[in-house]
Structures are given as C-alpha cells and as structure tokens.
C-alpha cells in the first residue's frame, strides 16, 4: 500500500515554541520510509519564518502558503487527489480550511488533534478557532493525542464516525555513550505555559532551592522576563531538535510536566516523555490518569506530586535502580512507541476509514435500491 498523504499543519519548519514540529517530523519521515508520498502544507507565519530549524526533509516535502486563498489556488488538485488529507490542530483559519477540505477532497479526510484535551475543553466552553463541533462528523477520521476512553467520547458526544488515538513519538537515536559525569541533577525541556508553571515550581524550582549544591536546568522559550530563577537553575532559551539527545544525556533525571487540561483528561503523553525515554534518561513525572499505559511507574519512570518526593529521588535513589529505570524505559519505547509504530497505526486507521466508507456506500446503495423497488411496485 503506497499512499499520497497531504498534511496541513501548524508548523513543521520551526520547533521554536512549537511542540507540533517534533511530532510531525517523526511521523512524516516514518511514512516516507514506508514508501508513502508525503507533503506538508504550512502557513508562512512570521514567528516560524524567523526561527526555522528544519534541515532538509528526508523523503517528504514542505510547501509554504501565504493566505487562505492560496490553498485551493496552489494545492487544490493535490488535496483533491490525495489518498489521505490530514488537518492538524491550531492551524490558522482551521475551520475554513476544514470546511473546504471535507467538501473538496476525494480521499480519506482526518483531523489530527495534537491538542485533544485543549480542544475538548474549548468546545465545551463555547468554541475554539481551529475546529468546530459541527465539522467533526464530516471528517472520516479523528486522530486524537489522548487515548484511553477519549476516542469513544469523541465518537459518542461529537459524532465522529471513527476516532482513534495516535500518540506522538520520538525520532531520536538513544545516546549510547553517556558522559562520565552529568551536568545537571534534574532538567526540564518545554515552552512556558501558565497552567504548567505551578507544577514546574513544585517539582523543579522548589527542589532546586532546597538542594543548593545541585545544578538544575530549564530549556524553552516564552518564559516571562520577570520570572525569578534560583541561582542554581541554568536557563536555555531554545534547543534545536538535534541538540535534544545531548541535553537529556547531560541530566541525571529529567522532569515531565503536563498541562492542566491534559492532566485532567488523562491518557495524554507529551512528546518530551518519549524523547527522554528514547535517550535513556530516567524520568520524574507528575501524575495523571493513564500514564501507566505509556510507561510503567516505578520500573520505567518515577512519579512525584511535590518537592519532597523529588528531593528524595535525587538524594536517595540508588544508582543501579536509576540506570535500570532508564534502560527499561528505552526498551519500552523501542517496543511500542517509535515513529515506525505510529506510521503503521496510521495506515491501520486509514484502512478502517476506507472500510467504513465502503460499508456506508453499500448501505446507501441498498437503501436506494429498496426505495426504488417499492416506488415502482
């Protein structure tokens, strides 16, 4: 099966303040390696234009457009003839694009929700800019970043004909030669988010103040300039994806902090969780429902609710157990959570959508035939 796939997403060319980039790059490269023809369409927005860090895509293409009118004018035939057209969350003019694509594309259409908890909260509160409740049933497939019971909710409450989980993954080579001495006891990689900051405060900044002899690090953009950092917390404004592996390798532990909507809904792992595990760095994470379906607590990762638990881990956990947790997590990623796994899952979901389409068409044809027979008798 060789598919023509078109993805209209937020940005794949820049990872600055954009967690979508890592997910898209890993998935699209994996699809290309499996022989599919893949094109990513991205609005040429100033922020991403000024911070582009994508090297030459391997086997897939990126096309930029400047306005909503450019899509039908420049890419109308590409979208019409593609086997699969995916529209991502947070796409500018997403509602208008979704309306046009679901009316124009002849192949399977999918909404790829990289922000499912945020999307569902927004819809419950009156609406969001990139998708509407009325459009969800028009997509053949809803791909959710949240698993567990969430796809069923999307089908039952919002009328999606087919909703499936499609988590992120990490396209990073594990670091086989770890440094003899790590630079930081605990680190964190993530763009600033107001609802995530209290967790970062409890699980990294408070432990840093208590462990003055240890070194900590926070990497990511958009943090407020007036935020006061402990003296032993190093700040890195931005890390290119190519630097992530070394960054993780330089930490004894790395912190995973989840946004409030994701913690509340559950079953919503972040890309940083997969990246760190793939790099062989043991993870300390906040708690949320369903985390055990991704990595097993205690054996593949560690959980903490407050600074005392983090301090105890950093101070008392035996080194052999720390290394065992890291190795177990890396093995779990290789077994279940690589970009290749996600590409195969997407193929399976595509085939489900095709089968459902054909079944629906047969039912409609049978219904029409019965109606015609009754009218003629």
Image (spheres, rainbow, N blue to C red):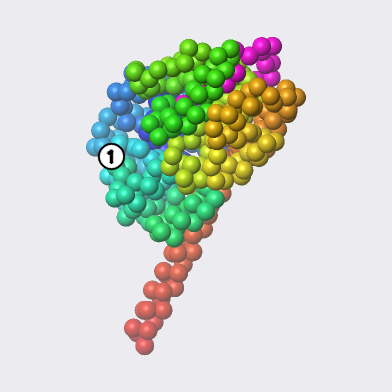
323 or 232, nearer to the observer: 232
- Residue at 50% x, 15% y: name it: 233
Q: Quadrant of residue 371?
A: bottom left
Is 347 rendered above or below residue 321?
A: below
244 or 308, nearer to the observer: 308
193 or 83, nearer to the observer: 193
Is 105 rendered above or below residue 227?
A: below
367 or 152, nearer to the observer: 152
Q: Give the range drawn in magenta.
A: 173-190
Q: Can residue 181 be found in the magenta stretch?
A: yes
For residue 126, side relative to residue 33 (left or right): left
Across and down, in percent, residue 339 comes to 57, 35
Quadrant (top left, top right, bottom left, bottom right) of the C terminus: bottom left
Across and down, in percent, residue 169 comes to 55, 34
Across and down, in percent, residue 87 comes to 39, 42
- Residue at 68% x, 36% y: name it: 298
- Residue at 34% x, 18% y: name it: 226
Across and down, in percent, residue 132 comes to 32, 50
**Residue that carries the numbered disc 1 in the rendered image:** 93
Q: Furthest-right residue in view?
A: 320
């Amino acid at each position: 099966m060789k598919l023509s796939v078109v993805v209209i997403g937020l940005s794949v060319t820049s990872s600055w303040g954009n967690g979508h980039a890592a997910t898209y790059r890993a998935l699209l490269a994996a699809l290309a390696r499996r022989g599919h023809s893949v094109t990513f369409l991205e609005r040429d927005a100033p922020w991403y234009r000024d911070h582009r860090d994508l090297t030459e895509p391997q086997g897939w293409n990126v096309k930029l457009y400047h306005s909503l009118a450019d899509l039908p004018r420049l890419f109308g035939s590409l979208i019409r003839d593609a086997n699969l057209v995916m529209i991502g969350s947070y796409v500018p003019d997403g509602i208008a694009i979704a309306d046009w694509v679901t009316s124009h594309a002849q192949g399977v259409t999918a909404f790829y929700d990289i922000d499912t908890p945020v999307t569902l909260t927004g819809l419950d509160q009156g609406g969001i800019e990139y998708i509407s409740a009325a459009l969800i049933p028009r997509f053949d497939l809803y791909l959710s970043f949240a698993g567990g019971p969430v796809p069923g909710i999307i089908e039952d409450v919002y009328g999606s004909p087919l909703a499936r989980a499609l988590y992120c993954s990490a396209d990073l080579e594990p670091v086989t030669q770890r440094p003899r001495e790590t630079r930081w006891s605990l680190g964190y990689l993530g763009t600033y988010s107001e609802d995530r900051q209290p967790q970062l405060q409890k699980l990294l900044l408070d432990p840093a103040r208590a462990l003055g002899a240890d070194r900590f690090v926070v990497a990511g953009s958009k943090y407020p300039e007036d935020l006061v950092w402990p003296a032993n917390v190093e700040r890195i404004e931005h890390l290119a994806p190519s630097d992530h592996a070394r960054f993780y390798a330089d930490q004894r532990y790395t912190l995973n902090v989840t946004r409030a909507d994701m913690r509340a809904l559950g079953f919503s792992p972040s890309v940083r969780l997969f990246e760190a595990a793939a790099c062989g760095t043991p993870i300390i994470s906040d708690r949320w429902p369903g985390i055990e379906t991704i990595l097993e607590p205690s054996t593949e990762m560690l959980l903490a609710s407050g600074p005392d638990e983090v301090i105890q881990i950093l101070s008392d956990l035996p080194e052999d157990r720390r290394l065992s947790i890291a190795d177990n997590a890396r093995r779990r990623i290789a077994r279940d959570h690589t970009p290749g796994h996600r590409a195969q899952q997407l193929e399976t979901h595509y085939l489900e959508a095709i089968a459902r389409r054909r079944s629906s068409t047969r039912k409609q044809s049978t219904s029409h035939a019965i109606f015609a027979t009754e009218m003629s008798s």
